[in-house]
Structure formats: C-alpha cells, structure tokens
Image (cartoon, rainbow, N blue to C red):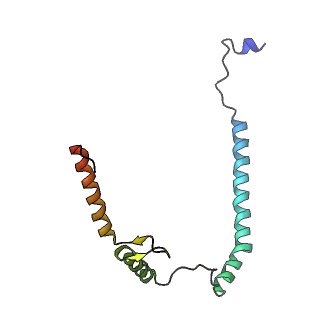
Amino acid sequence: MAEHEHPFGHEPSAIAARRVLVIGAILAFVVLTSVVVLHFVLRDLVMPRHAELMLRPGVLPPEPRLQPSPQNDLAVFRARKEALLSGYAWTDAKHTYARIPIARAMQIYARQHAAAARAATTGAPQ
C-alpha cells in the first residue's frame, strides 16, 4: 500500500511541524530553567559572600613577592653584569683561568682569526 501513496518513491515534502515544535519547546524549557536556577544561585549564594570577601583585609602573598621598585633592581643587576663584562678577575682559586673585558676578548679573537684567515689564503702554516 505504501507504494501507491508515493508512486515515485519520494518522501513527502511536508515537515513534521509537531515534532519540531515539541523539541523546540523542550530546549526552550531547559534553557529558561537553567537561567532561573543560575540567577537564584548567584543571588543567594555568591553575591552576599562577594561583598563580605571584598571587605576583609588583604593577606600578603607567599614569597617571592613582586618587587616594589623593579627599575632600581634592574639597574643594580645591569651594573653588576657590566662590571663582570668590563673587568679583570681570576675565576678560580688556583689562578688558572682569568676573566678579561669583553672588548679585549673580541680584539684577541679577531686578531687570531685574521691571522688564520691570512694563512689559509696564502697557504702558509700558522
């Protein structure tokens, strides 16, 4: 009998409006119920505590805390690093290794590699 109702095998073009309306009504009910529940939860449980929490005195956070004057600390840090980069000092107790200023180290490095480059181009040993 179903073959005679739809002779070409097509589905009917009508939309199941009742089913769509029922599903829409259920979704609307769920959304509205959620909004109402959240409203009462926030109003009765969270908001009174929020005002109470805002009025209590602050507690110091645990160490390490933020620096009160980071510009001064940064200036001291940079001065120490600059002193390390621009001064001479022994780096070990046996006086085997020394620290030299970076500008002097770059001059020595450039002189050594310039001599090596000249020797490589002329073919002469170092």
Question: For this rendering, which residue is in front, 116 or 41?
Answer: 116
Question: For this rendering, which residue is in front, 85 or 42?
Answer: 85
Q: Quadrant of residue 5?
A: top right
Please state the total of marks drawn on the protein image: 0
Measured as percent of width and height from the top left, residue 83 is found at: 38, 78
Q: Residue furthest left?
A: 122
Q: Above or below — where is 41 with respect to 26?
A: below
Q: Residue furthest front?
A: 125
Q: Above or below — where is 78 with respect to 34?
A: below
For residue 103, side relative to residue 9 (left or right) = left
For residue 9, side relative to residue 114 (left or right) = right
Q: Above or below — where is 25 with respect to 85?
A: above
Seen at 41% across and 72% down, the residue is 98
Q: Residue furthest right?
A: 1
Question: For this rendering, which residue is in front, 21 or 109?
Answer: 109
Measured as percent of width and height from the top left, residue 1 is found at: 78, 12
For residue 112, side relative to residue 36 (left or right) = left
Q: Residue furthest bottom?
A: 57
Seen at 63% across and 80% down, the residue is 61
Measured as percent of width and height from the top left, residue 36 is found at: 71, 63
Measured as percent of width and height from the top left, residue 49 is found at: 71, 78
Seen at 74% across and 63% down, the residue is 37
Question: For this rendering, which residue is in front, 64 or 9?
Answer: 64
